[in-house]
Amino acid sequence: MQLTNPSPSLHNEDLAPATERKWGAFSIFNVWTSDVHSLWGYYLAASLFLLCGSFLNFVLAIGLGSLVIFFLMSLVGNAGVRTGVPFPVLARASFGVFGANAPAMVRAVVACFWYGAQTAAASGAIVALLIRSPAMLEFHQTSQMLGHSTLEVICYVLVWAAQLMIIQRGMETVRKFQDWAGPAVWIMMLFLAIYLVVKSGTFSFGAEIPQDVLLAATKDAGVPGAPGSFAALAAVAATWITYFAALYLNFCDFSRYATDEAALRKGNLWGLPVNLLAFCLVAGVTTTAAFAVYGEVLLHPDQISAKFDSWFLALLAALTFTVATLGINVVANFVSAAFDISNVFPSKISFKGGGYIAALIALVLYPWAPWETGAAHFVNFIGSTMGPIFGIMMVDYYLIRKAQLNVNALYQEQGEFRFEGGWHVKAFIALAIGMLFSSILPTFTTLLPSWWGVYGWFFGVAIGGAVYYALRASSR
């Protein structure tokens, strides 16, 4: 749409409603192949698969969880198609034209952390390949830099730089990259699964893994209860849904480029419930076959590829999973942070500039590696923080505004969304209350039951959204 006199403090070419809409169903599908087919995604998928206890339980827990993900992504995705705006601009409707910078920067911080985590995971796959060489292994063990081995630092910087090359030409390059990377990773995943199943001579779902060994290997998945129990299955579904918490916010960064809602719906259908079930199944079967071959529960594909006798197969696997992790970093983290940071000073920071800042933050964080604190706590805490923001935005768009939004006013300093000096106080009250119960109390106190944290994101969505609706209803 054509904007009328947008305020320079709220507008630049990258934040304006999308005019070129070339993302068909295949490109939307590959948003999801790029997002989940990573080393972290594989680890979580394999862990949750094994904790289901049986194939039927897997279909129920992961299947229902994937349907919930499809529904939630459709909510925010449709908003992106209809308005054409990215997440930080859409957030102006509920948080105010300047207040939207708060949730945007929360999301940007999350993206920078994940950017570093995924870059480290991708570089780790390369390190695992290189240290097959005795000379490289010695270098890895004897040379240190910034609290890591020098080899790890070099690989991290190389992967970090490769991502900048992908993003510097804009969103159309991102689409072309993921349209190639998504299918390539699927081919390698299937090859890895078939290779190990044939080598092991068995096709199983993990029943032969001793429960104590399984629980020790999957302890970071944060799933309570015995594998296959109701408590475990509920936690599996909740953890799987929460894993996508950040994308619930910024999926409109991509859906805004979709050709229409039909393409979005088709891409989401194949990319979410169908693709997620298939990915988890392949990850689980590969892990159980690897246990039969190597006698270990190897939940990371780079651990499996490191054991290959063939240098060629190890190289192929390392490169494939590095590309997969680059894909999720570009899709889930780089793009999001770029828009979020650009939104703070639109007249001074472009989409590219915001991306460069995010990448620099991830580089500075590397010596401390804050993502190495346990996958479950990291995913659950960060994910639950996103819950109240998502609840408030969806309540505002669908229940308060009935999916009717004055897009032009999102770019006007003195328009409909100015609220209290550009900040919507009611939204921030709801956000504070929602975060109290979704993140702060379960993480830093013992006031709530121990299981509460597993479902923190859900409490955040429900409490934040309900408080916001009540506050808005009371003023009408």
Image: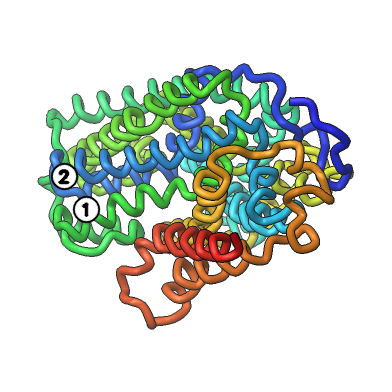
Residue plotted at (68% across, 27% down): 171
Please provide percent x and percent y for residue 10.
Answer: 81, 45
Please provide percent x and percent y for residue 178.
Answer: 55, 25
Please provide percent x and percent y for residue 311.
Answer: 42, 27
Mark 1: which secondary structure?
A: helix
Q: Quadrant of residue 403?
A: top right
Task: Please tell me how crowded label 2 is: few (under 14), some (14-19), or many (20+) other residues with Cα within 10 Å.
Answer: some
All told, the count of numbered labels is 2
Observer-nearest of 198 and 427: 427
The residue tagged 2 is 57
- Is 117 left or right of 410, judged from the image as shown? left
The residue tagged 1 is 233
**408 in relation to 270, above or below:** below
- Residue type of the residue flagged with mark 1: Leu
- One can see residue 135 in this view: no
Observer-nearest of 382 and 195: 382
- Residue type of the residue flagged with mark 2: Asn
